[in-house]
Image (cartoon, rainbow, N blue to C red):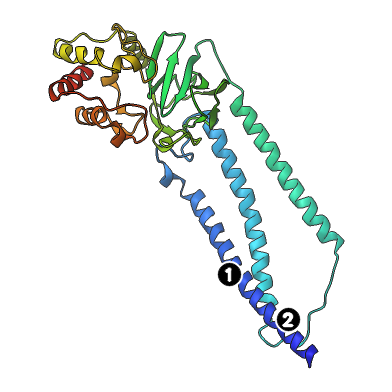
Amino acid sequence: MTRTWAKVERVRKCGSLAGTCSRLAARTLFVAVWCGWLALARPAFAVPTSIFEPASPTAAAISELFYLVLAITGVILLLVGGMLLYCIVKFRSGGKATHEPPQIYGSQPIEVAWTVGPLLTVFVLLMVVIRTVAETRQPDLTSDTIHVRVIGHQWWWEYQYPDLGVTTANELYIPAGTESRPRPILLTLESADVAHSFWVQRLSGKTDLIPGRQNQLWFKTSQVGVYRGQCAEYCGAQHANMLLRVVVQPQRDFDDWMAHQKRPAVEAAAGSAGREVFMSHTCVNCHLIRGTPAVGTVGPELTHLASRATLAAGVVENTPQNLAEWIAHPQDVKPGCNMPALRLTPDEFRDLVVYLETLK
């Protein structure tokens, strides 16, 4: 009697296991279908931070690696899920089993297959990853390469063009080059405080900025446009709002932008009162405005602030209203940032905003 109940209990457990495996197989197939749809629906993901629309050779190499890995793992998923589903349907107990099935252990061909197969798969993946890493990490530089020193701060970006004598903040401008000969861009990455990570998905892979160390990142593109990215390494409370904006321009437009950036701050009569407010408060200790006594290096360079498209490292659009809100209530716009709220009179506040709007 005891032996009979034991067999019944084993049958019951087998039925429960079959139900669990059935649910697992259904989920496996769902994931496989979803991955296939993801690959086929690539144009639908053409968003500013998508890896599915690469705009440079390095980004294209990473995208191709993704699709290859997706295809290989997708085939494995379908094979394993299909075999699991077949076994569940083919060998389900149906509640009529009266004895255990034959217990068979050991099959040399199967053991060789499931050992050699994964080894070959891992070897292929390792080789293609090594090839892609070598392709994306080895700079293809020329005599006209643009060198940019990128310094990550909490929570904004500083861009220095050492060969061109220009420093700016939060918006990286580069030339596109031509279709047949894109101009290489070499970024030297540094951090002023904590670890950050530079990642503009459509232009390159991710590279970290480590305090006390220099890393390099390179890419080239012939596609004009605005490319967005984000710091990809947690760096504090405003990590999510440490955004990247790369503007790729035709060579002539880039030359005009660079010539404009080299000019000192505009001396506009409309901003004279606000200039005095700026120079007499703590603003002057943190920010640089070329051609003025303001030579601070703690915060972003402001010589041509009004010509930028965004404020606070891409958090808000650069408009007079947003600029006024950013100055008056920086902790509301970007909580935790290092910019203090100034204690100004209404007239001083208005004059300061007018002055900053003249910095074009």
Q: Is residue 265 above or below residue 120?
A: above
Name which of mark 1 and mark 2 comes first in the sequence: 2
The residue lying furthest to the bottom in this view is: 1
Q: Which mark is residue 133?
A: none
Q: Marks 2 and 1: in contact by CB < 8 Å?
A: no
Q: Which residue is mark 2?
A: 10
Location of residue 307 (image quadrant): top left
Amino acid carrying label 1: it is Arg
Amino acid carrying label 2: it is Arg
The residue lying furthest to the front in this view is: 343
Q: Is residue 172 above or below residue 121?
A: above
Q: Residues within 10 Å of mark 1 (few under 14, many from 20)?
A: few
Count of number-bearing discs: 2
Q: Which mark is residue 23?
A: 1
Residue positioned 46% across, 10% down in the render: 162
Residue 225 horizontal side relative to residue 54, left or right: left
